[in-house]
Image: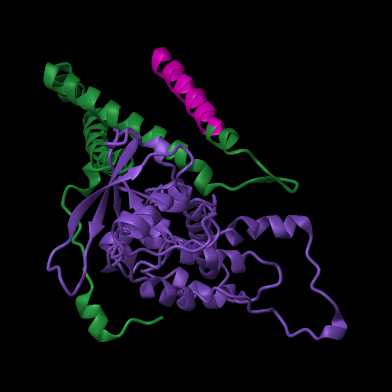
Amino acid sequence: MASSTGEKTCTLELFRYHPDQDREPRFQSYEVPYRTDWVVLDALNYIKGELDGTVTYRWSCRMGVCGSCGMMVNGVPKLSCATFLKDYYPATIRVEPLSNFPVIRDMVVNFDDFMHKLTEVKAWMIPKEPRTLDEGAYIQSPGELAEYKQYTMCINCMLCYAACPVYGHEPDFIGPAAIALAQRYNKDSRDGAAAERSDVIQSNEGVWECTLVGECSQVCPKHVDPAGAIQEAKLQGAQDWWKSVLMPWGKR
Amino acid sequence: MQANSEQRKRELVRPIPGNWWLRRRPYTVFMLRELSAGFIALYAILLFRLMHRAPDQVNFGLLVDELKGPTFIFLHLVVLGFALLNTITTFNLAPRVFKLYRGEEKVPESLIAGAHYAAWIVASIVLLVIAWRA
């Protein structure tokens, strides 16, 4: 496509919803200059700066670290800062807010539910025993680090929730990222709260809701593999259950 | 930031359309994988019927003749297709389930999936040999 000046252009179709004006969402098309080094976020910034200042979306770092700019790009959850126009050109690019979350305005969604789930699974370090400074640093081998390192890469971008049809249908499902982050601490040799977390993770709303669609891992921009974390937690839950049946006198 | 109740009322909750699983190929494959369980269960019932009738040679022969008809051959092909889909999609997901380490190095995902396929081929050959000799 080309503009009147002969410059190559690209069409973006943006999801628009303004709660004070719109009863229903609508799509609005914008023509932006086509540049091979532009990502969808660059195009959105161009639209906001040059064409329509009312377009609303979240973004921050522009380098795939902050996890703010997750959106549906042609129906697939993507970080808009890491999604190049050239991969879609000359087709129209449709940009929508992340699926499975309530929309506040345009591409901005409400992620309170995810934040609440992070606290439910206690996604933070709860040490096995208090340790004073005099006792020195916690010692951890490279093997122990490898057990959980992958899960530390999660940037809370929520693309995995947008890709998960189980979460879409069952919003009570704890969901991929929160479970992966719980596993991040469960697998950490310094942590001692796996049993506390298991009450939530092994509940009906926890890992057993997952039907292993696997798309959460496919769309994860940081290769955290939340589907793997969930299966790992299922395996652990099954082992713990058998232990409790075969050795009821044992420690949980 | 926690949204207040007034903001919540103004938020747009998008319903999930009934054809959500047709909108992207991975979801369609997932739904077909789920559906395959039904066909495999049906086939298990058929096998149980065969086993149940096995002691009675006359009844067993009648059922075997019935299975040679075009309807059952078609059913077999459909079930085979779903069984293959179920097996392949499950094996491809196996590396999600089994995380193995050789010392401190993670075993490559391709090796885990490959081991499943190898075991499948070996098991199939063993079954074919047993069936051939019977």
Q: Is residue A103 visible?
A: no
Colouring convention used in this rendered image of the protein? by chain
The residue at 55%/30% (across/down) is B114
The residue at 64%/59% (across/down) is A148
The answer to whether A213 appears left or right of A142 in the picture is left
Quadrant in the picture for the C terminus of chain B: top left
Say which quarter of the image contains residue B24: top left
User: x, y percentage for residue A194?
Assistant: 58, 72
User: x, y percentage for residue A77?
Assistant: 37, 51
The residue at 30%/67% (across/down) is A171
Pick the residue in front: B129 or B30: B30
Q: Colour of chain B?
A: green
The answer to whether A199 appears left or right of B31 in the picture is right
User: x, y percentage for residue A46?
Assistant: 38, 53
Q: Is residue B126 above or below residue A232?
A: above
Pick the residue in front: A87 or A11: A11
Say which quarter of the image contains residue A126: bottom right
Q: Which residues are magenta?
A: B114-134
The residue at 85%/78% (across/down) is A136
The answer to whether A174 appears left or right of A95 in the picture is right
Is B127 inside the magenta-drawn segment?
A: yes
Pick the residue in front: A162 or B126: A162
User: x, y percentage for residue A86?
Assistant: 41, 36
Q: Is residue B84 visible?
A: yes
Image chain in purple: A
Q: Residue furthest front?
A: A5
Quadrant in the picture for the N terminus of chain B: bottom left
Say which quarter of the image contains residue A110: bottom left
Pick the residue in front: A116 or A54: A54
Q: Main secondary structure of the magenta part?
A: helix
Is A89 inside the magenta-drawn segment?
A: no
Q: Residue furthest top?
A: B132
